[in-house]
Image (cartoon, rainbow, N blue to C red):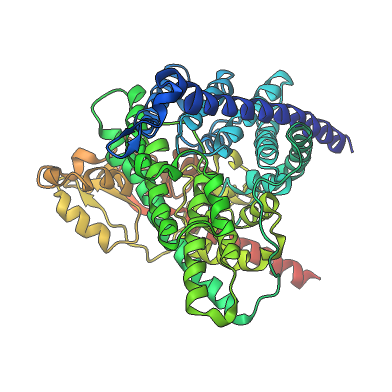
Amino acid sequence: MKWVWRWIFLGVLIGVISGFGAILFNFLLQRGTQFFTKDLLTLFLPEKLQEFSLWGFPLSRWMILWVPALGGLFSGLLIFRFAPEAGGAGVNAMIEDFHRGKGVVRKRVPVIKMIASAITIGSGGSAGKQGPIAQICSGLASFLSSLLKMDDRDRRIMLLAGAAGGIGAIFKAPLGAALFATEVLYRRTEFEFEGIIPSILSSIVAYTVFTLYYGWETILHIPRLSPILAPSELLIYGVFGIFCAAIGFLYIHFFYGIRDRFFNRLPFSKLFKPALGGFMLGILAFFLPQVLGVGYDSIQSAIDGNLTLWMMLVLVFAKIFATSFTISSGGSGGIFAPSLFIGSMLGGFYGRVCSTLFPELLLNPSGFVLVGMGGFFAGVAKVPIASLIMVAEMTGGYSLIVPMMIVSIISYLLLGETSLYEKQVSTRIDSPAHVGDFSVDLLDHISVKEALPPDRKVEAVPEGMQFEEILQLIVHSNQNNFPVVDQNGRLKGILSLTDIRRVMFERELHKLVIAKDIAVEEVLTVRLEDNLNTALKKMTEAEIRELPVVSKEDPQKIISMLSRKDIIRTYHDQIERIKKGRLGQS
């Protein structure tokens, strides 16, 4: 009972702090937008000159070319001088803090994130509020936990409650935010269930504080939509789920591809890369100003049917480019609102096409706009439950829960483990936060030898093997890690798929590199006599899925490879034996 009252108190306290944090952040966003879109314009262009035409465009339009770059310059200098972890999408940082940072957030991060995001979004950056507010309020909750001298477990729960409170307040979606904070940590269908109740309490209180100041009106307004769907309509929504997954796949790969293959390779300081991203965004926005900022006005236009068919299709891809330019370059902002934008435009386009092809079904394109928002984000963010609840709360569109469920699940399943949030882990067992939680007592009594399949063959890589030969080997192998051995078969290092990918795109190095050049020399190993808990801890701490098994007498002699799947399979087999034993006794 003491535990219950303790978390009620903490949940309410975090909610109050998060609610005021959301109010302050929203205020700074409004001031930032006012400065960059109006005050700056008036400063450089007197009112009489603003509509003066140059090459067919008013002078005020030409400001778009450099204002996002200016915002990127300011935010880049602020972030990379004082708090580099405040760059990019804030939810990724929150996830990282939970899994690997023990819930600890530096005190300066919420302040830097708040100011940098207000500058980025206010200057037209294609980003949203969710990431920043999640990192801001989780940081405030982490600071509170330090003041109260909480242990690592409780600090992590408070971190989630802070994120839920901030998101629930600023999006006026208390239930969806609580589910999001506890669901977004994992790529598979898992929740951080210990944090659900504190997150719900915090989110409700923060929502109440925020709406008392800003009002109770939903963020988007929708027409009255019929909740009754014919089987043929459900089929059409099912096909739409496939389209959401396909565009989601392109979005994620372009988003990280332009970061890794373009921005990260530029030969100048990170401080100035957000400015370059802002300039690239400005060029795009000069022709398509709808891609600037959060984009709620354009989403509302799509709901109201005020956008043309082809404009919605163009905006799907334009927003992917705009968001990648803004955030992948190091700018500070969230990817929730841009994802809603992309999903809404895709839904509006698809709904309009289907209503033309099947006029007898009386399809409402506005419904597809809403379903696209929820279904698209569910797939790319791996949050199939939270996404549909959040969109329903933001719009009042509860009548579309059924089609949104269909699209969300299809999109989620087809995308597999491809996610916008690269810091997510697959399941609780993969999280460093839960090292030791996975039936430690049971795993302590099972040896590595018992978990190894007797017929397993280890594919080792000679240290002199050419890179092209290594590529051929991994194509036909089920292994993720490859021991590198000398001519006597003794262990000299290990190669992972990650190590191989680093060289894969540098084609000029393929004929020069051999296995020894890219192998990691410090190899974590286990022996046949070690228990599975020891092996699992080594895998989790090093974030790997396989370990070489070596001889007790000769630590460089490879016997086999132990995988995480072997541990899980052995664990389940042992549980089944225990269950059967208990049934036999009864």
- Frontmost residue, 401 versus 293: 293
Q: Is residue 132 above or below residue 320?
A: above
Kindly tell me whether residue 75 is visible in this rendering. Answer: no
State the image coordinates of residue 97 (x, y, percent, origin top left): 56, 33
Q: Residue at x 65, y 33 (%)?
A: 159
Q: Residue at x 47, y 63 (%)?
A: 349
- Frontmost residue, 293 versus 576: 293
Extreme right residue here? 1
Describe residue 67's horizontal placement relative to residue 149 as left or right: left
Describe residue 141's horizontal placement relative to residue 567 as left or right: right
Kindly tell me whether residue 150 is visible in this rendering. Answer: yes
Instruction: Tell me how many marks there are.
Output: 0
Q: Is residue 396 above or below residue 23?
A: below
- Frontmost residue, 401 versus 354: 354
State the image coordinates of residue 559 (x, y, percent, origin top left): 35, 53
Q: Is residue 501 above or below residue 224?
A: above
